[in-house]
Structures are given as structure tokens and as C-alpha cells.
Image: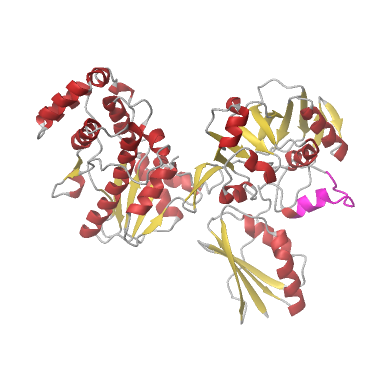
Amino acid sequence: MVLKFKFKYKASTKTYVNILHSFIENYECEYKILQDLDHIYLLVEAKEETLEDLSNNLSNFLPMSIYYEGLEVDVVKTMPKLESVKAEAQSFNSFCPSCLQAVEDEKSVNYYNAFKFCKACKTFEDGIFLLDKKEVTSSKELFENLASFINENKRIKIKTISSTFVFQKLHSLDESKTILCTNLKNISSLVVEEKQSIVALASIEKPLITFKVNEIYKMKEKVSKEFIDIRVANDLTLYLLSKELEKYKIDFLQIEDENSSYDYFLDVKTDDIVNIDVPKIMYCENRKFILSSNCYSKNLDVVYNRFEEKNKAQFMTVLSENMLFDKAILNFYISNKYDDRFTFYSEELNGFVDTSKKITLPKNMNELYKQISESKSGDRLLENYKQKFPKEYENSLLFDFTLIKTNSFLSYFKVAKAILGFENSILSNALNCHLEKGPRVDFKIIENEKLFLREFDYVSMFKSAMSFKLAGIDEVTLSLGFIDSLASFIASEVDKINDLYKVEGISLCGDMFTYDIFTKLVLKNITNNYKIYFNREFVIDK
């Protein structure tokens, strides 16, 4: 009897492969492990009672992963003839369930051994703790003492598998950049609970995730910070310390860099060099985005570095990760870092074709106002604007265009903020708007027979925004209008390009898509049943 476990696992990493190899060695059976673009397969041939025992224990042994999306189990007639995927010699992950079970078992020789590891996870090999330069054994007593120090408001410097940090009891959220949550059960006392993100925190990747601070905590502690980055223990040293902190009802620790002052230093004496990455991720519309990470195939760096234009480089990584080189894909790259570009890829066209000219900006505000006045009905609009908003107009003339470093829609938003006299940025306003839609700001293309010679009409965009302000639309609502209109513009571009070429899929990349509200609006506005692609393991905007 052959049982097939089909794990939906959208990554090229061997994390699950390593763990499955380690798990299956405990059973008398024949097995193979296979991996393709979206799945890992475990095929096991054994007696029925062995398969039943294996199935019951697998869920306890296999950790959650940010790349895992589901499991199907089926019976197949025969074992496939394909060669099994081999395990890596050593995996570079945080502690696995097997090692965690060992350090928590009072009868185990590894009870409270922070240096326990196996082929499926990694820590300092042959490590010895040094507490203020004195050798100490990894024991329950050690971690009880460390927890007591923190409870007494002491600051402890700790060498972890992801660098050295200083930890202390959380005193001021406003002064904190990153928080270690020591008890996930109580995370909702600090932030708005998001199930998908909380499950991800506990995954084997142990990522860093930004959460919204809840209103009750803000009022109670008189906190002004809106968002905070949170992670959990990603090595056994921090995990065992977290366990002992439960006695003191300490659920959060403030994390500072190793150059901060400290009272005690828990160092590690070892010849082993370990530096396991803490990726930063976010979720939007049930999609995962990697904001920063080193945990991807370094072949993607080679792919990325082939192109000088960052928009093409990023697009190429999406094509590579999703194996789309035989598809016709339209890419939208919108970024705060580099120049925006919309690009169509097709084998039939021998590669990339930009769908318009590069985004341009005027040299200064006087040039922009001259362009507005020379456009249709622009002179009257500008005169009315000067009369009704003289202060905003005069202040806008002081705007320094040399501070703008990218030709992008986000740069247009900065210019619009100056023209309209907004107090806050368009993005921050839109994030705080509770409406579903904003006024339709004029985002359009000046058409040309040749696709790559089309040009974005920024004059019309600024004119329509000024008209809305003259009509009394408030700052927050008009800001949402910019975001909503850009999302609608992207959808209209999809339809236009699809009329010229058959678009088989759409890819979205650039850090603009890390803004929840914008990504939701883009996905909502693309009404046809297009397949949408993002980076899988590579960062969304390198």
C-alpha cells in the first residue's frame, strides 16, 4: 500500500524535505520525497498499521511554514520511478518540533539544553554559555536567573543565532522599534490580532511582522505609536527564557542592538559561525509578501543583477520564481526606491516591451503651473485656485523638485501634497480613510500608435485634484481618490494591453504593493479572471 502526502508548499527551500527525511527514518518503510514548483510529495509504502501510526504522528512532527498552504492525502497504486529529493547536509532553520520536545522533556538528557539541534534545524554546535565571561551550563536554573534579572528591570545582552541583541522588559512602546513576544497567547493585549500573521510568527521561519497597536493599549499606556514590529523566539535560548518569563507575566521584551547598554551578557563560546536570517513579511488578501530576507535561492540574485533597470530586474525574478518564461505577462512595478515602469513580456515579442515612456516630472513648480495654464481650461482653473487658496499656492512654489529622486507615481503624490497643501502624505491619509472609494482623480495616458511611445498625462492628474479641492473635498478623502484612481488606472491598462496582445497573467512588484489598501484596490479593480503573480521567496522590491 502506497500513501501519498501532497503538501502545497510554494518555495524552493528544502525545509520540509529535510524535516520529512528526519521524520520518516523512524519507520520501517520504503519512501520517496519529491518536489516541484508548488508541492512537496511524501510517498510511503508500508504495512497498514505503520502507515496509520505515521499519519497520526506527522502533524505533530511537521512545523508550520510561511510557505505551506495545505495538505492532501491519497492512496496510489505504485511508487513513482522518479528519484527522491535528497536532504541537505545541514538545514539552517530555527528549532524544529523534535528538538523542542526534547528540551521540554524533564526525563531527556537535553532538558533545557539550548544547543540541541538535528539535521532539520541549526544552532551553535558545541556551544558553551558565558555569563559575564564565566562558563555556565545550559540549565533550567540559568534561565530562571535570567528571567529574574529581567523582572528586576535589568538589561540582558544575548548572543542568538541571528546576531546579538539587548533585551529588557517593555517600558515604552513609543521608544521601541522591535518587540519580542514571549507569550503568543497574550499578543492581543498589545496589538490587533490577525490570525494569519500570528500563525506565521510561530512558523519555523519565525518572521518579523508589523502589527497595528490596539486602541485599548494606546489609551491605557498613553501611546502614540500606530504600528510595531514583532517577532518571537527563533532559537532555544530565547524560547527557554520566554518560558521562564511566564511566571512573571512578562509577555513582551524590548529589543535593542548590541551596542546598547546592558547589565549582564549571555555570550556563547563556540567556533561555529551561525547567522540565521529573520525575514520580514506581511499579508494582504491572503497573500504573503517578503519585505526583507536572505532566505531565497541565490540564483535569483544572479537573475536580478542581469538588468540595470531595477523594474526589469524585479520583473525577471517574478518570471523566474513562477516559471513564466513561456507565458505572456504584463508587469506593474511601482516603487518608492526606483523608477516605475509598466512592461509586457512575451516570447513572441522576443522579451520585454515597455507599455509607455518613462514617467517624467517638470523641473519646478513654475513649469508645472505653466503647463496647467496652457492646457484646456487650465488658465481659469489656476486663477480660481490662486484666489481661493493663496497660501497653498505660494507655499507650493517653494517645493524643491531636486529632493525627488525617482520618476514614480509616489513622486507625483509628493508634488500633489505640496500643491494641495496637505498636512500629511497621500499614502498615510489614505491608510486612515474609512471610505471604500475616493473621488476619481484623472489618471490617463496620452495615446500613440506605438505602445512604448505612449505617455502618462500628469497635467490632467494635477488639474483634476485641484478641481476636487476647489469643490471642497477634504484631504483624507481626496488622498484615497489618488490611491483608488491609480488602482483603477492599472486595471484599465490591463484591458488596453490585452486588446493588443493576449495577456496570460499579471505580475505586481515594487514596495508600493506593501501598502494593504493599494493592493486590495488593485486586486479589486482587475475584474477579468487574470492570474496574478508576485515574488514567492524573493523580496518584493530589492
**Image position of 383 with respect to 301: above or below:** above
Say above or below: 223 vs 96: above
How are the residues colored? secondary structure
- Numbered label tally: 0
Considering only vertical position in the picture, is 535 above or below 54? above
Task: Find residue 82 and report its horizontal and vertical position in percent.
Answer: 58, 71
**In the image shown, does 133 or 431 lie closer to the viewer?**
431
Read off the magenta span.
98-112
**Residue 510 lies in quadrant:** top left
Q: Is residue 257 left or right of residue 243?
A: left
Left or right side of 371 for 83? right
Residue at figure coordinates x 24%, y 17% from the top left: 394
Left or right: 521 as drawn, with respect to 172: left
Image position, residue 534 (x, y; %)? 43, 51
Q: Quadrant of the C terminus?
A: top left
Q: Quadrant of the N terminus?
A: bottom right
Q: Position of residue 203 (x, y in %)?
A: 63, 50
Q: Residue at x 9, y 35 (%)?
A: 376
Q: Name the one closer to the observer, 452 or 490.
A: 490
In magenta segment, residue 108: yes
Relative horizontal placement of residue 462, taking residue 210 as reference (left or right): left
Residue at x-position 33% and y-position 47%: 332
Determine the image quadrant of residue 71. bottom right
Q: Quadrant of residue 113?
A: top right
Foreground of the two, 255 or 88: 255
User: Magenta stretch containing residue 191, yes or no?
Assistant: no
Q: Is residue 423 visible?
A: yes
Q: Is residue 276 among what the camera can see?
A: no
